[in-house]
């Protein structure tokens, strides 16, 4: 199975020709102390849990971002999955300093550490992969986690205003990939704490093994200054997976301990 497709399907279950590109520098994300817990459902079954967190680690690398996903319940007996992504984000530039990827489903295991050098070359960056060695890549390249937080901080309001797609060039699984995110309008969703106004986005998917089209993923972000991803849906070739924000933790935030209902 193509590794890139495998990662996009299972990890983003957590979570375009012209458009807004990410070549320019914008505000560095400030989501320190944020923890998001998700429940993943296939139909009526709970099939997985996922957590994304960002903590201050200034003594080591800057902001430490960690994302974990694992199968639960009956799904664990069918396919036991444990995925972990980590990234150290430079608090000055918002770019990745290093990243870790660990994927394990019993039969398929990958572990890789990647170091990013954005300073040695003026016209490009250098990536050192534990698995494949040195690579020269486009200047100021992102990984999957730093691009996610940069998108929330800078590009959601910009894309709503212009109506253009956002295109991130990221380095993941020893490959360069264009992650394209399209604004799909506003929608109000129901939660146990009332209705929440949201902004809808369609990140690009890969048609083939899991998806019929390249827009079969939808993410709902709160329509406020936090842009919290409260719901995720993947329309698969067979059925769909829905991710619900089970708990949100951050001091003084009104969405703390938010639990979504179907």
Image (tube, helix red, strand yellow):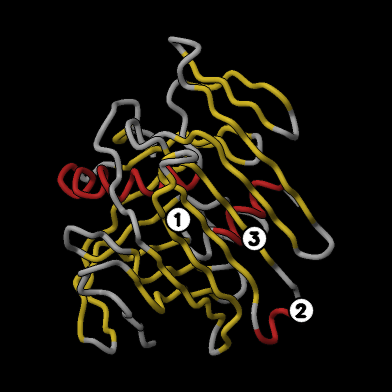
- Residue beneath disc 2: 78
* Nearer to us in this view, 57 or 85: 57
Residue beneath the point at 44% across and 46% down: 57
Q: Up-down: is 79 above or below 200?
A: below
Q: Position of residue 128 (x, y in %)?
A: 64, 26
Residue beneath the point at 24% across and 37% down: 27
Give the spatial CA distance, label 3 vs label 1. 24 Å
Front: mark 3 or 2: 3
CA neighbours of label 3 inside 10 A, class few (<14), some (14 to 19), many (20+):
many
CA neighbours of label 1 inside 10 A, class few (<14), some (14 to 19), many (20+):
some
Front: mark 3 or 1: 3
Image disc number at residue 83: 3
Residue beneath the point at 20% across and 69% down: 252
Pointer 3 or 2: first along the chain: 2
Give the spatial CA distance, label 3 vs label 2. 16 Å
* Nearer to us in this view, 171 or 66: 66
Residue beneath the point at 75% across and 34% down: 131
Pointer 2 or 1: first along the chain: 2
> Does residue 147 appear anywhere in the picture?
no
Give the spatial CA distance, label 2 vs label 1. 27 Å
CA neighbours of label 2 inside 10 A, class few (<14), some (14 to 19), many (20+):
few
Image disc number at residue 180: none
* Nearer to us in this view, 52 or 210: 52
- Residue beneath disc 1: 215
Secondary structure, mark 2, is helix
In the image: residue 4, left or right of residue 37: right
């Amino acid at each position: 199975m193509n590794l890139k497709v495998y990662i996009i399907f299972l990890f983003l279950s957590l979570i375009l020709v012209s458009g807004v590109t990410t070549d320019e520098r914008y505000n560095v994300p400030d989501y320190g102390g944020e923890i998001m817990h998700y429940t993943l459902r296939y139909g009526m079954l709970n099939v997985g849990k996922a957590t994304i967190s960002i903590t201050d680690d200034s003594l080591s690398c800057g902001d430490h971002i960690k994302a974990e996903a694992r199968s639960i319940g009956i799904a664990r007996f069918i396919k036991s999955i444990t995925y972990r992504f980590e990234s150290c984000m430079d608090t000055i530039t918002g770019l990745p300093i290093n990243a870790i990827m660990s994927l394990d489903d019993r039969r398929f295991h990958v572990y890789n550490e990647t170091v990013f050098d954005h300073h040695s070359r003026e016209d490009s960056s250098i990536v050192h992969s534990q698995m494949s060695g040195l690579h020269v890549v486009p200047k100021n390249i992102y990984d999957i986690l730093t691009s996610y937080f940069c998108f929330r901080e800078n590009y959601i309001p910009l894309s709503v205003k212009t109506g253009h797609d956002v295109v991130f060039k990221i380095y993941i699984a020893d490959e360069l990939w264009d992650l394209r995110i399209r604004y799909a309008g506003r929608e109000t969703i129901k939660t146990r704490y009332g209705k929440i106004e949201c902004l809808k986005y369609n990140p690009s998917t890969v048609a083939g093994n899991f998806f019929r089209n390249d827009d079969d993923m939808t993410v709902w972000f709160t329509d406020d200054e936090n842009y919290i991803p409260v719901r995720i849906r993947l329309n698969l070739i067979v059925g769909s997976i829905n991710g619900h924000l089970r708990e949100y933790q951050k001091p003084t935030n009104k969405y703390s301990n938010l639990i979504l209902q179907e």
